[in-house]
Image (cartoon, grey):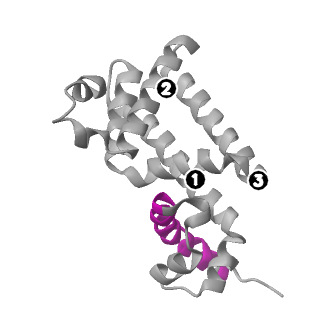
């Protein structure tokens, strides 16, 4: 069977919108609770075509995590380019913007949760380590300073994922912790 360039181009164009829908689905339900039928229906494609595009549900999940990790890395690169001064401050500001878009961060957290699956875990570990290394190199800082930045980012991630700021009226320490 011969596949035309038109077919390949059409499939590539179709993947991106489907991935954004998959990010929302996996953010809400995780790998095992996420429904490929819901993703296909929302994307307006046949369920079988979803598997033609991505192979398996795990491969679709990994494609969503790849999209999210690439988006974070790109935001960091753009922030350092656009904002003079301390690169960590620039990346921190960019990350705070990402906190509003909770779906991406929830996909990252679901990736951590699914890391017990060998196929998922190997990829998640690789992507996480790559993002850490690229961010450290982009900032031009040592590992100690990077660990502090990274730890605070993880605190902010968990706070956003759990909507911790919703308790700020009852817990005065929350705004100070997150500022």
Under circle 1, the secondary element is: helix
141 horizontally vs 174: left or right: right
Which residue is at a point 56% across and 58% down the rendered structure image?
Answer: 64
Residue linked to disc 1: 65
Between disc 3 and disc 1, the foreground one is 3
34 horizontally vs 163: left or right: right
Q: Can residue 142 be seen in this snapshot?
A: no
* Towards the viewer: 75 or 40: 40
Could you say where residue 83 lies in the image, as x and y percent from the top left?
A: 32, 28
Residue linked to disc 2: 150
Could you say where residue 65 lies in the image, as x and y percent from the top left?
A: 58, 53
Q: Quadrant of the C terminus?
A: top left
Tell me which corner region of the image, top left, top right, bottom left or bottom right, holds residue 153.
top left
Under circle 3, the secondary element is: helix
Q: Measure the C-alpha gap from mark 3 to mark 1.
A: 13 Å
Which residue is at a point 56% across and 80% down the rendered structure image?
Answer: 37
Residue linked to disc 3: 119
Q: Measure the C-alpha gap from mark 3 to mark 2.
A: 25 Å
- The part of the chain drawn in magenta is 7-28
Assess whether residue 19 is covered by the magenta stretch.
yes
Which residue is at a point 56% across and 23% down the rendered structure image?
Answer: 137
* Towards the viewer: 82 or 43: 43
Q: Residues within 10 Å of mark 3 (few under 14, many from 20)?
A: few
Tell me which corner region of the image, top left, top right, bottom left or bottom right, holds residue 127.
top right
* Towards the viewer: 45 or 118: 118
Could you say where residue 96 lies in the image, as x and y percent from the top left?
A: 33, 37
Q: Measure the C-alpha gap from mark 2 to mark 1.
A: 18 Å
Q: Residues within 10 Å of mark 1 (few under 14, many from 20)?
A: many
């Amino acid at each position: 069977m011969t596949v035309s360039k038109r077919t390949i181009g059409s499939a590539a164009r179709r993947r991106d919108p489907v991935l954004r829908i998959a990010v929302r689905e996996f953010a809400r339900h995780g790998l095992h609770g996420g429904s490929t039928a819901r993703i296909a229906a929302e994307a307006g494609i046949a369920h079988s075509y979803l598997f033609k595009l991505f192979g398996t549900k795990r491969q679709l999940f990994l494609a969503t995590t790849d999209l999210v990790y690439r988006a974070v890395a790109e935001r960091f690169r753009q922030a350092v380019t656009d904002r003079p001064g301390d690169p960590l401050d620039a990346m921190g500001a960019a990350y705070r913007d990402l906190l509003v878009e909770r779906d991406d961060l929830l996909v990252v957290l679901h990736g951590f949760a699914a890391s017990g699956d060998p196929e998922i875990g190997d990829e998640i570990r690789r992507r996480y380590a790559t993002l850490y290394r690229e961010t450290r190199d982009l900032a031009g800082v040592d590992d100690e300073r990077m660990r502090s930045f990274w730890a605070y980012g993880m605190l902010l991630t968990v706070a956003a994922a759990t909507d911790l700021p919703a308790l700020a009226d009852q817990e005065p320490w929350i705004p100070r912790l997150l500022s």
